[in-house]
Image (tube, helix red, strand yellow):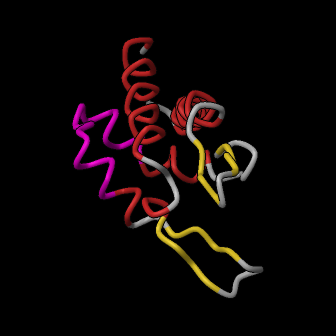
């Protein structure tokens, strides 16, 4: 796959998760697309998709290892700590839908 088509594929995956997956902050739902975190997460998830290795555990590992900067850079929190279980399920569904459309 060419670099340009890989970039388009990552953009499509980012679009698929950006408005479906959210961070829960003080009962506010901040969608990944609005937080500008969807592309960075899609870049990490894309190798799992292309290698057909998407599992709940693998996705959880990526979320746990993806830092989210808060407080103007004063602190970082793992994305896994900010995404509730229901939204993590939405993420897995969005990835599955994306894979089906490939």
Q: Nearer the viewer, residue 39 or 81?
A: 81
What residue lies at 68% left-to-right and 87% top-to-bottom? 74
Query: In x, y percent, where is residue 14?
Result: 59, 37
* Secondary structure that dominates the magenta span: helix
Instruction: Give percent across and percent down for residue 83.
Output: 50, 52
> Left or right: 91 with respect to 53?
right
- Residue at far bottom of view: 74
Quadrant of res 34: top right
Q: How many marks?
A: 0
Q: Quadrant of residue 89?
A: top left
Horizontal arrangement in the rendering, residue 98 relative to residue 8 (left or right): left
Q: Quadrant of the N terminus?
A: top left
**Who's the residue at 64% across and 46% down the image?**
32
Q: Residue, x 63% and y 37% (percent of image)?
A: 18
**x then y, percent, for residue 20:** 58, 31
Q: Quadrant of the C terminus?
A: top left
Asked if residue 76 lies left or right of residue 94, the reply is right
Task: Let me know if residue 57 is in the magenta part.
Answer: yes
Where residue 75 appears, x then y in whole percent?
Answer: 62, 84
**Along the line of sight, which residue is nearer the eye, 68 or 42?**
68
Image vertical order of residue 102 relative to residue 17, above or below: above
Identity of the residue drawn at 61% across and 45% down: 38
**Magenta residues, start to end:** 45-61
| Whether residue 37 is situated above or below residue 99 in the rendered picture | below
Furthest residue toward front:
27
Q: Is residue 29 magenta?
A: no
């Amino acid at each position: 796959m060419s670099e340009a088509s890989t970039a388009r594929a990552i953009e499509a995956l980012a679009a698929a998760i950006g408005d479906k997956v959210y961070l829960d902050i003080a009962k506010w739902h901040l969608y990944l697309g609005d937080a500008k975190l969807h592309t960075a997460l899609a870049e990490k998830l894309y190798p799992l998709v292309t290698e057909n290795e998407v599992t709940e555990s693998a996705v959880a590992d990526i979320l746990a290892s993806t830092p989210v900067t808060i407080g103007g850079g004063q602190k970082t929190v793992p994305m896994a700590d900010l995404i509730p279980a229901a939204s993590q399920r939405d993420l897995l569904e969005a990835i599955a839908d994306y894979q089906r459309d490939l």
